[in-house]
Image (cartoon, rainbow, N blue to C red):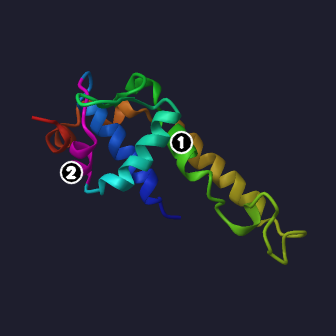
Amino acid sequence: MRLTMRTSLAMRTLMFCAVNRGRIVRRQEVAEACGASENHLAQVIHLLAQKKFLHTIRGRSGGLMLGRPPTQITVGQVFREFERVLPFSECMQPDGGDCPLRASCKLNCVLVEALDAFYARLDRVTLDELVEGNTGLETLLRVA
């Protein structure tokens, strides 16, 4: 299992905004701190804003900020929005995929159970827990 770059950027963006809480940050600042292209980041920010994780402000003095308190954003929520669009395995596709074993295979049930446990664990971690008291992260992400 490997985290997609989009999910990684989503978490980095949210942590950046949480560290700089109460301040409107610019996409360029996030891109520089997170080692991402602004174009790729724009797609991630758009989805985060659609799902109300971020609030975006247009215009010359615009930017982005958290759409809700960091105590109300869980890692599980973010991962679901970015990772669940990709089936974990072929047999988990809505149409069952082309696996010749799908009619008798029990692996799908095991995978579903494992993913449920994975997301349940991520649901117990808030954005606030990732950044609060994390001085190393604050040093890396705090805007001067």
Q: Is residue 117 above or below residue 90?
A: above
Residue plotted at (57% across, 49% down): 118
Please, what is the three-letter code of the amino acid marked with disc 2? Answer: Glu
Q: Quadrant of residue 125?
A: top left
Q: Residue reaching furthest front?
A: 59
Disc 2: which residue: 32
Disc 1: which residue: 121
Q: Residue reaching furthest right?
A: 103
Q: Nearer the viewer, residue 119 or 140?
A: 140
Q: Position of residue 55 (x, y in %)?
A: 40, 28
Specify whether residue 60 is in view: yes
Read off the magenta span: 23-34
Q: Quadrant of residue 58?
A: top left
Q: Earlier in the sequence, mark 2 or mark 1?
A: 2
Q: Is residue 81 above or below residue 96?
A: above
Give the spatial CA distance, label 2 vs label 1: 30 Å
Q: Residues within 10 Å of mark 1 (few under 14, many from 20)?
A: few
Helix, strand or loop status at disc 1 = helix
Residue plotted at (53% across, 34% down): 51
Say whether residue 116 is left or right of residue 132: right
Please, what is the three-letter code of the amino acid marked with disc 1? Answer: Arg
